[in-house]
Image: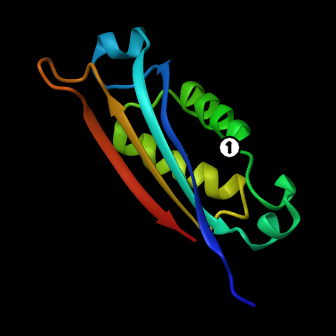
Amino acid sequence: MVIETGKISIKELEFLCIIGTLPFEREKEQPVVLNVSLWLDFTQAARNEDLIHSIDYAQLAEEVKNFIRLSQFQLVETLVVETGKFILANHSRAQAVEVSVRKPLAIPGCKSAEASIKISR
């Protein structure tokens, strides 16, 4: 049997959260833009056309957004690492995860500051 490893991605999920180390960043939510990719075996999902054999990306988006909002991370580095670990811990079908986050307001005159990581089982 051939294993059909595929990738599911959530692109440009925008929401507000507490993120940063500066005093004003700890008081007021600011926008972040999140990207998440998961690698998993598509074989059963493709054969059966059943979401039970995959990962519901709408549900995943809400889970991740809530996790980040509740965590109130200080560093974007911590945000991507802990979010990746959270996804792998809660979605056993995922073989690997890549998480990136941008802070559009982090640096005046700059489009954004960004951090990313890929974690495999």
The residue to which callout 1 is attached is 57
Q: Position of residue 53 (x, y in %)?
A: 82, 62
Depth check: give the residue in front, 2 or 64.
2
Total marks placed: 1
Q: Position of residue 69 (x, y in %)?
A: 56, 25
Depth check: give the residue in front, 70 or 47.
47
Q: Position of residue 99 (x, y in %)?
A: 46, 49
Tell me: residue 63, above or below residue 117. above
* Residue at position x 60%, y 66% in the image: 6
Q: How many residues crowd around disc 1 within 10 Å: few (fewer than 14), some, or many (20 or more)?
A: some
Helix, strand or loop under label 1: helix
- Amino acid under disc 1: Tyr
Position of 95 compared to 12: left or right?
right
Position of 53 compared to 68: left or right?
right
Residue farthest along the bottom direction in this orientation: 1
* Residue at position x 63%, y 28% in the image: 66
Depth check: give the residue in front, 86 or 50.
50
* Residue at position x 32%, y 27% in the image: 103
Give the quadrant of residue 61. top right
Tell me: residue 45, above or below residue 26. below
Give the quadrant of residue 47. bottom right
Position of 71 compared to 108: left or right?
right
